[in-house]
Amino acid sequence: WRAFWGDRSELRRFRDGTVCESVVWASAPGAKHNIVPTIARLALQRHLPKGTGVRAALSHFRCVLPALDWALHLDQDQDPDPNPGPQGL
């Protein structure tokens, strides 16, 4: 775990008393879609050879992920609409 995440990994104690290595990804409300590209960028930059084109690969994430923000705000007891689109069609 530490070899993969490096200094992003930290020892944390959880409410149940368990202590383990973890990585915490925080973001502002309304920007949670940025967590996935941040994780991907860190992992790719850390483990791929220099000059591999990490930025180009991540640009595809940035185009799609903001469109998924609606899913981050769903009530957890509510099932997402399988056909989200204009109403009345």
Image (cartoon, helix red, strand yellow):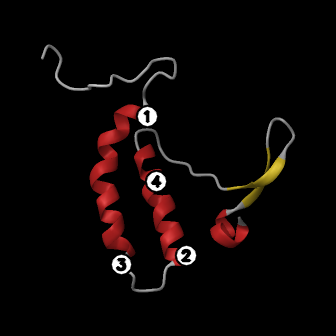
Indicate whether 55 appears above or below 52.
Answer: above
Quick one: label 1 or label 4, which is nearer the N terminus?
A: 4
Q: In this view, does 18 lie to the left or right of 67?
A: right
Residue 32, position as x, y percentages in the image = 45, 44
Kindly give the residue lying farthest to the right in the view shown.
17
Residue of label 3: 53
Q: Between label 1 and label 3, give the one nearer the viewer.
A: 3
Residue at 31%, 71% (x, y): give it.
56
Q: Is mark 4 on a helix, strand or loop?
A: helix
Residue of label 1: 72
Q: How far apart are marks 3 and 4 (CA)?
A: 18 Å
Amino acid at the residue labelled 3: Gly
* Labelled disc at residue 32: none
Amino acid at the residue labelled 4: Val
Residue of label 2: 46
Q: What element carries label 3?
A: loop
Quick one: label 1 or label 2, which is nearer the N terminus?
A: 2
Quick one: label 1 or label 3, which is nearer the N terminus?
A: 3
Q: In this view, does 56 lie to the left or right of 23?
A: left
Residue of label 4: 36
Amino acid at the residue labelled 1: Leu
Q: Distance between the residues labelled 2 and 3?
A: 13 Å
